Image: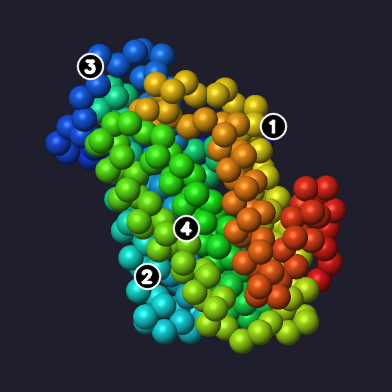
């Protein structure tokens, strides 16, 4: 039997050395645990994103990006590490251990050696920035509005400002490129099916997750069904139309992913 190696994100000691972020002594135990689990998950996700942007930076160098386009990618690495530590400090303030196990090994960012370096970078920035970071902007914006603890609202605000920049990385690169030729459109359209498969796999459990009480939302817990509705709304009203404006068959790719079909390059 084969076993998948799991990576552990351990920020407990580092977070414990920081000033206490907020007071939670009178918090209900059930709400505390729900909020703590959510913030621990955010910690792992944000810390992992630093690794992803680190890989993107190397790909950007190989693709010949100018320094003014590489600098924001390099900046994103530090920002994601900072986000991870912020979330870890919330976990500690909630009385938890700021240690979390990922679902598998550290994610590998594909090199796309079947195409030119710039097209490979475009694929990754579409996936990471245009899709997942844009979804993150919507989710964090909603969660910031739901939270009722000032210190946590400040944490969400700090994260949100950076996530907006991270989403813009991909959209700005698309805006700067010449129109894709027919072959590039076909290849990118086929790749979008894989991207959207990943979206559905990653967020697919949300509709089946328990709803969060108003008190849990007040402390930054996530509401699974509500977040799933937001993911779908953001895909259909923002991400798919914007990709279509760059001559990419995003809606067809989304339908193919949703039905298990495939587009052929």
Instruction: Identify the mark nearer the N-term, 2 or 1.
Output: 1
Disc 1 designates what residue?
Answer: 1
> How far across and down, in percent of the image, does residue 58 sit?
45, 71
Q: Residue at x 78, y 48 (%)?
A: 258
* Pointer 3 residue: 25
- Give whichever of 131, 2 is nearer the camera: 131
Can residue 51 be seen here? The reply is: no
Measure the C-alpha gap from mark 2 to mark 1.
Answer: 43 Å
Residue 169 horizontal/vertical position (percent): 46, 69
Q: Quadrant of the N terminus?
A: top right
Q: Residue 52 carries which label?
A: 4
How many residues crowd mark 4 within 10 Å: few (<14), some (14–19), many (20+)? Answer: some
Q: Is residue 22 left or right of residue 254?
A: left
The residue that disc 2 covers is 72
Question: Which residue is drawn at the image coordinates 32% and 48% (left, top)?
Answer: 157
Numbered disc 4: secondary structure: helix
The picture places residue 143, in percent across and down from the top left corner, at: 43, 39
């Amino acid at each position: 039997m084969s076993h998948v190696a799991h990576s552990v994100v351990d920020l407990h000691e580092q977070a414990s050395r920081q000033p206490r972020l907020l007071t939670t002594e009178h918090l209900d135990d059930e709400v505390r645990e729900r909020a703590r689990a959510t913030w621990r998950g955010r910690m792992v996700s944000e810390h992992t994103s630093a690794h992803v942007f680190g890989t993107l930076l190397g790909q950007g160098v190989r693709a010949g990006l100018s320094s003014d386009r590489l600098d924001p990618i390099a900046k994103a690495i530090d920002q994601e590490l900072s986000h991870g530590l912020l979330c870890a400090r919330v976990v500690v303030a909630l009385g938890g251990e700021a240690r979390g196990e990922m679902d598998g090994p550290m994610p590998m960012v594909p090199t796309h050696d079947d195409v030119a370096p710039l097209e490979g970078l475009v694929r990754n920035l579409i996936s990471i920035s245009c899709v997942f970071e844009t979804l993150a902007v919507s989710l964090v914006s909603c969660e910031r509005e739901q939270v009722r603890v000032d210190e946590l609202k400040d944490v969400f605000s700090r994260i949100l400002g950076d996530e907006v920049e991270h989403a813009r990385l991909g959209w700005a690169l698309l805006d700067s490129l010449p129109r894709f030729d027919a072959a590039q459109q076909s290849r990118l359209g086929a790749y979008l099916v894989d991207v959207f498969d990943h979206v559905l796999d990653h967020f697919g459990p949300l509709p089946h997750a328990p709803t969060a009480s108003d008190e849990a939302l007040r402390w930054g817990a996530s509401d699974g069904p509500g977040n799933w509705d937001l993911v779908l709304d953001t895909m259909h009203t923002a991400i798919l139309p914007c990709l279509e404006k760059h001559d990419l068959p995003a809606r067809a790719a989304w339908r193919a992913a949703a039905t298990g079909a495939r587009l052929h390059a």
